Structure formats: structure tokens, C-alpha cells
Image (cartoon, rainbow, N blue to C red):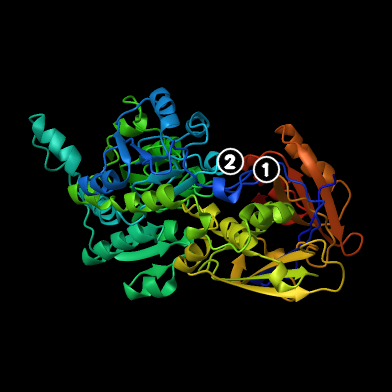
């Protein structure tokens, strides 16, 4: 079966974009698997219990300590097994007897856990904010829901961030250790004041907002970067939203509160440290992986970063011999962001999320009002579901700066009557593609509309009725994003649109597989060879290469599909080719 190809439409140097992603797709678009919670399962198998009798209680495994209120709630409706500090092998053994699993951040819910469950595990509840310790792809494949309690630890994490901020500024940890060692070094531990200093809050979600409120109370000037933060919420507490580069370049203190995603992984690295003020101070109570820890050590040694206060690490616990942990200008805590008596009690709401799903999940309509079975919808729309998510992922990667994505319009062209085409799966997958790459939220049919609304993203749908046979459900899907800026200036057409059929005035065929490098260049001999040679030297395989041009020796756009992500050095070398005017790497 041939793979449906699309192309990217991209011109005009106007940085404002009403980015429209449009594809003409047919059922020829083949996919090997669906990244969706109910892949390969019927509606009623989605969260049905594997219990012996209709009246049997479900079994819930609590793998980390939960507040008494949450445990009491669970015990009313389920058999509760509280088994803490399980090894991976012990967890894999126990999970085959459990219908639900509740964890905090310390337990890794890996693919092996889902495979060991034998299909019985229906819900994983994360008592806290992030869900990066859960293998979401494996959960999807095994039809398991993942829920969390995102507000439970907000205040505790924010307070810990402020505590680290103040302790770092005044050398509290170092001075304490010095006095206990019998020394009295007042001159050595002179600190810096917080009043009047600029704090950049990187990630203006619930925790970031609470940190900003408290920092304002300490007399700090607070700026923030978050592509999805509502500007009115920031203004309400006196915070200015700025670009990423502006935030790191002007801050005296940087406090990290973004989720760990492919986009934010090692976001603070040698390159970004080089853009910061000399003597900047960094606090991280988010996720360890957002900092390149080796690069941070180099920045500390060079004086670019004066101090760092870290509650989280890429690998926890870190090695006792870690240069970062042992650095004299670093204070560390063992992931204590949520560790208050009050926060432990507040994570009880995750129990109220888990119980309805395992007790009443046998009828999916309780949580998802489909008029037809989900299996039927997925079977018919299967060629378009993956494509819809990739459209969203592609769109959000072309957006930069400003206030992020706020308005999305989806247009479906079909010969079917509106009542014969249920597009909620496609809308959910587009929402998933737009939000998940820059968020810790896992988007599915249950929460897609709510998640979009919560993040201030307005999604509207429009249908174009075509003449012809209604046998194929769709002829095309178009995604249009208004009033944003593009990191690839040529992505904006004269009408302010990005279309997946053209790159501006250039006809370029692009397959939405793997990843894509887009280059705007002067059309001249040898360009394909130069770029291909750079990629070949790094053993990066090219899956396709397509060039569109207006006329010979004029401007052209080259699209290159790659199976692997090139290194930053290779991408930089591509950008340094004299004939290339701009380029962007898009990971699908």
C-alpha cells in the first residue's frame, strides 16, 4: 500500500502567521500502529475489570505512600495493597493481580509493567503533577488510562522553590555546614539580596504562577516564559511574558517549572548558558532532565552560573561522586518539592479519579458519550488519526515567541453528511499534537476539549461538503493557527497560511514520517549533495528529498526527510552553507 504524502506550503517573510496545515489524504496513508489509548481494543474492553465476579472489588496497588484520606477512600470501594519500595521485578510480579496502580514520582511504570499485567491493569494514577515516570506509549498500546492530580502539590513545590531561592542567595547550606565543622567564616558567605533582582519563571503553570506571586512579595521583578500562559493571568499578578531568549538573557535568577518533554529535554545547555548574564543563579524544582547537568558544571566552573539550587536530577538518586552534587556552589535536596504533611494529604484526589474508572469503566459511555462504538470510529478513521496528530505536532513546532497557540481552526472536506462523520477522534488527536510536545499533559478523547480550554486554546471546526462518493470519510483536513509567529519565516504564505500541499509558491512533496529539515535556499547546483554529505558524515539516513522552486537559479525550498535526529553541530553546518537563507528542523 502506498504511503500518502503531503507537502508543506510556506512563503512571505511576514512573521505573523495564520498557519494553516492542510492535507489531501486518502485511505492509502498506512500506519503500523495507533498512538491512542484504545488501539486494538473494542469500546468495552477499554477499562473493563478482569475480576472473577460482577460484584468483586477491584484491587488497587499503592506503590508509594499516600495520605490517609486517599487510602480511606480507596478502601471503601477496593481491595488496597500498600506495598512500598518495590523493586522493578517485584512490581512486575504484583501487577498481574491489580486493576489499578497508584504511584508518585519514585516508581517507574515501564513497558514491562504493562506487559506483565496481562491486560488487567486499567488505570495508573499519578499522585502529583508530572507523568514522565509512566511509559505513555506502552499505556496507550495496552488500553490503560493514566490520570494524575495536578494541583495537589502546587503550593508545596512553589514554597520549596522559594526556600531554595533564598537559601542559595544567602549561602545557607554552605554556612550551616561550615559552622557545624567548627568554622566561623562570615566574610566567605556574603550573599546577595533578592529585592530588585529579576527572576525569570520558566514555565508559567500552576507552580510557576505561585512562585511568581511569592517572588513579587519579596520585592523581585518577575518575568516569565511559557508559550501557553494566558497573558491576562500574568498581567493580573504583575508578571511580564517574554520570549525564551529574552528571559534567560535578562534574568538574575532563573526558576524552572516546565515539564520534561522532548522539546524541553536539556533545554538549559552550553548554548543557552552562553546567552545568560554572567553570575546568574538557577533553581530547579521541576524535572532534572530539563538541564544538561554536565553543561551546568561547566557553566558553574566558568562563572557564567554563580550558583544553582537543585531538587531534581536526571537520574535519582544521583551518584554521590557527582561533580554537580559535590560542587561548592550548588545546594541540593532529595526531590522534596511535594514533601509536606499537607501535600501528602492533598494527593487524595487521585483516588477519586481512579475509582470511578475501575468501578464503572465497563461502560465507556460513562466518560465518553459516543453514539457509535469507538472501535467502529477508529476502524474507519484509522488512516487519518495518526495524520491528525502529526499535523498538530508540525504546527506547534513552527510556532515561536508571542503568546503561543490560542486559536485553532480545523476544516474537514468530505462528501458525507455531517451526521455521518464523527470527527471527535480527529479533533482530540490534533489537540494532542499541539499540546503534548510542550506539556506534561497526556491528551486523549476524555480530556482533549477540557485540556484545550484549560490552556486557553480555542478550537473550532468547519466542514466543507463535497460532491462525490461518500465512501471515503474524508478528502482533506486543514489545521489553521492564527495570530502567532513562525520560527521558519518562509512558512507564511501571502495569505498568511501554511498549507501541507505547497511551500509558499513552491511545490514540494513531503512525507510525514520520521523528521523533516526545511531549507529556504538559492537554487544552484550541488545543494542536495552538500546537505546530503553533511548528514551522511553523521550516518543520518535520508528517507526522501524534495525541492520546489519558482524558476531556475531563483529561490527554492528543499525538504529533507531523515530517520534520525541530526546533532546540533550538523544542523549548524547546514545553516552555514552560504546559499541557505534559513532552515528549521521538525520532529514528527
Residue at x 11% of width, y 29% of height? 181
State the image quarter where residue 540 is shown: top right
Whether residue 281 is visible to the viewer of this picture, yes or no, is no
Residue that label 1 marks: 33
- Label 2 crowding class (10 Å Cα cut-off): few <14, some 14-19, many 20+? many
Residue at x 27% of width, y 65% of height? 213
State the image quarter where residue 372 is shown: bottom right
Residue at x 37% of width, y 59% of height? 200
Whether residue 408 is visible to the viewer of this picture, yes or no, is yes
Q: Give the x, y percent position of residue 76.
A: 27, 47
Establish if 24 lies above or below 357: below
Establish if 84 lies above or below 572: above
Residue at x 67% of width, y 61% of height? 488
Residue that label 2 marks: 141
- Say which element carries label 1: loop
- Label 1 crowding class (10 Å Cα cut-off): few <14, some 14-19, many 20+? few
Instruction: Pick the residue in front: 443 or 544.
Output: 443
Q: Give the x, y percent position of residue 330.
A: 29, 39
Estimate the spatial distance between the alpha carbons at disc 1 and disc 2, rounded to whole Å: 9 Å
Earlier sequence position, callout 1 versus callout 2:
1
Amino acid at each position: 500500500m502506498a504511503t500518502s504524502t503531503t507537502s508543506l506550503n510556506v512563503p512571505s517573510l511576514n512573521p505573523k502567521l495564520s498557519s494553516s496545515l492542510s492535507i489531501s489524504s486518502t485511505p492509502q496513508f498506512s500506519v503500523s500502529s495507533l498512538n491512542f489509548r484504545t488501539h486494538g481494543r473494542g469500546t468495552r474492553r477499554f477499562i473493563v475489570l478482569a475480576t472473577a465476579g460482577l460484584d468483586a472489588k477491584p484491587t488497587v496497588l499503592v506503590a508509594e505512600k499516600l495520605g490517609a484520606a486517599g487510602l480511606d477512600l480507596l478502601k471503601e470501594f477496593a481491595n488496597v495493597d500498600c506495598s512500598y519500595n518495590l523493586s522493578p521485578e517485584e512490581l512486575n510480579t504484583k501487577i498481574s493481580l491489580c486493576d489499578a496502580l497508584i504511584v508518585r514520582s519514585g516508581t517507574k511504570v515501564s513497558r514491562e509493567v504493562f506487559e506483565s499485567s496481562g491486560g488487567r491493569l486499567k488505570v495508573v494514577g499519578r499522585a502529583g503533577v508530572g507523568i514522565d515516570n509512566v511509559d505513555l506509549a506502552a499505556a496507550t498500546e495496552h488500553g490503560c488510562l493514566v490520570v494524575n492530580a495536578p494541583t495537589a502539590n502546587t503550593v508545596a513545590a512553589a514554597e520549596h522553590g522559594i526556600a531554595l531561592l533564598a537559601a542559595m542567595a544567602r549561602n545557607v547550606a554552605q554556612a550551616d555546614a561550615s559552622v557545624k565543622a567548627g568554622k566561623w567564616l562570615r566574610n566567605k558567605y556574603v550573599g546577595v539580596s533578592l529585592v530588585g533582582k529579576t527572576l525569570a519563571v520558566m514555565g508559567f503553570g500552576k507552580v510557576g504562577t505561585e512562585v511568581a506571586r511569592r517572588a513579587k512579595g519579596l520585592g523581585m521583578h518577575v518575568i516569565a516564559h511559557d508559550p501557553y500562559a494566558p497573558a491576562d493571568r500574568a498581567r493580573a499578578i504583575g508578571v511580564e511574558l517574554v520570549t525564551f531568549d529574552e528571559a534567560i538573557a535578562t534574568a538574575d535568577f532563573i526558576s524552572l517549572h516546565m515539564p520534561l518533554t522532548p522539546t524541553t529535554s536539556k533545554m538549559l545547555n552550553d548554548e543557552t548558558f552562553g546567552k545568560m548574564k554572567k553570575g546568574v543563579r538557577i533553581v530547579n524544582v521541576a524535572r532534572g532532565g530539563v538541564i544538561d547537568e554536565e553543561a551546568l558544571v561547566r557553566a558553574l566552573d566558568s562563572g557564567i552560573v554563580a550558583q544553582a539550587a537543585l531538587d531534581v536530577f536526571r537520574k535519582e538518586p544521583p551518584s554521590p561522586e557527582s561533580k554537580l552534587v559535590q560542587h561548592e556552589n550548588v545546594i541540593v535536596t532529595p526531590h522534596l518539592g511535594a514533601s509536606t504533611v499537607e501535600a501528602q494529604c492533598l494527593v487524595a484526589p487521585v483516588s477519586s479519579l481512579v475509582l470511578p474508572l475501575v468501578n464503572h469503566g465497563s461502560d465507556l459511555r460513562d466518560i465518553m458519550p459516543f453514539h457509535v462504538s469507538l472501535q467502529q470510529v477508529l476502524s474507519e478513521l484509522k488512516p487519518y488519526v495518526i495524520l491528525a496528530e502529526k499535523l498538530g505536532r508540525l504546527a506547534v513546532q513552527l510556532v515561536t515567541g508571542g503568546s503561543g497557540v490560542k486559536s485553532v481552526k480545523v476544516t474537514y472536506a468530505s462528501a458525507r453528511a455531517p451526521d455521518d462523520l464523527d470527527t471527535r477522534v480527529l479533533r482530540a488527536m490534533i489537540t494532542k499534537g499541539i499540546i503534548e510536545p510542550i506539556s506534561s499533559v497526556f491528551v486523549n478523547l476524555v480530556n482533549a476539549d477540557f485540556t484545550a480550554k484549560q490552556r486557553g486554546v480555542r478550537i473550532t471546526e468547519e466542514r466543507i461538503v463535497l460532491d462525490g462518493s461518500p465512501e471515503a470519510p474524508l478528502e482533506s483536513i486543514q489545521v489553521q493557527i492564527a495570530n502567532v509567529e513562525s520560527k521558519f519565516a518562509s512558512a507564511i504564505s501571502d495569505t498568511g497560511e501554511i498549507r501541507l500541499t505547497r511551500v509558499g509558491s513552491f511545490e514540494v512533496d513531503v512525507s510525514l514520517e520520521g523528521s523533516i529539515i526545511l531549507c529556504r535556499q538559492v537554487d544552484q547546483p550541488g545543494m542536495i549533495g552538500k546537505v546530503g554529505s553533511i548528514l551522511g558524515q553523521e550516518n543520518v539516513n535520508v528517507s526522501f528529498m524534495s525541492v520546489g522552486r519558482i524558476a531556475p537559479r531563483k529561490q527554492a525550498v528543499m525538504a529533507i526527510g531523515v530517520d534520525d535526529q541530526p546533532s546540533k553541530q550538523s544542523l549548524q553546518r547546514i545553516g552555514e552553507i552560504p546559499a541557505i537563507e534559513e532552515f528549521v528542523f521538525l520532529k514528527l
